[in-house]
Image (cartoon, helix red, strand yellow):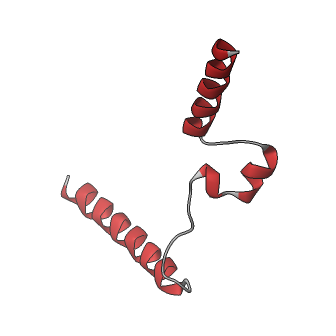
Amino acid sequence: MIQTILISGLLLAVGMALLLVKVLGRKDGTFSSQHIHDSEAMRERGIHCVMDQDRELRNQKQLKLEG
């Protein structure tokens, strides 16, 4: 049981150290955004955030009801 806990702790420590190296190695010290609207490839494909898609559909529905 103790061995499992020690191995798990060691693996977590190694993972955290690797993340630290990545952050320190970056120019601005941050990770790139993981949001869909910040991805150029997703924008080129016309893929939007689910909240944006919902807003667009609601606007279309409202325009149909008014027109």
Q: Position of residue 7 (x, y in %)?
A: 31, 62
Q: What percent of the width, then of the height, locates residue 19?
A: 45, 73
Please indicate whether residue 53 sits to the left or right of residue 16 in the image: right
The part of the image, by quadrant, that contains residue 61 is top right
- Left or right: residue 4 versus residue 58 is left
37 versus 21 height, above or below? above
Residue 8 in the image: state x and y as whole percent: 31, 59
Q: Residue 28 versus residue 3: which sits nearer the camera?
A: 28
The quadrant holding residue 20 is bottom left
Instruction: Give the percent coordinates (x, y) of residue 33.
Output: 56, 62
| 3 over 36 or under it: above or below | below
Q: Quadrant of the C terminus?
A: top right
Residue shown at 48%/81% (left/top)? 29
9 is higher (above) or lower (below) than 29: above
Front residue of 25 and 34: 34
Up-down: is 7 above or below 26? Answer: above
Q: Which residue is outermost to the left?
A: 2
- In the shown orientation, is residue 33 left or right of residue 18? right
Q: Is residue 47 left or right of residue 33?
A: right
Q: How many marks on residues?
A: 0
Residue pushed farthest front?
A: 67
Q: Residue at x 58, y 33 (%)?
A: 55
Residue found 74% across the figure and 50% down from its top? 43
Residue drawn at (24%, 58%) of the image:
5
Observer-nearest residue: 52 or 8? 52
For this rendering, which residue is in front, 47 or 63?
63
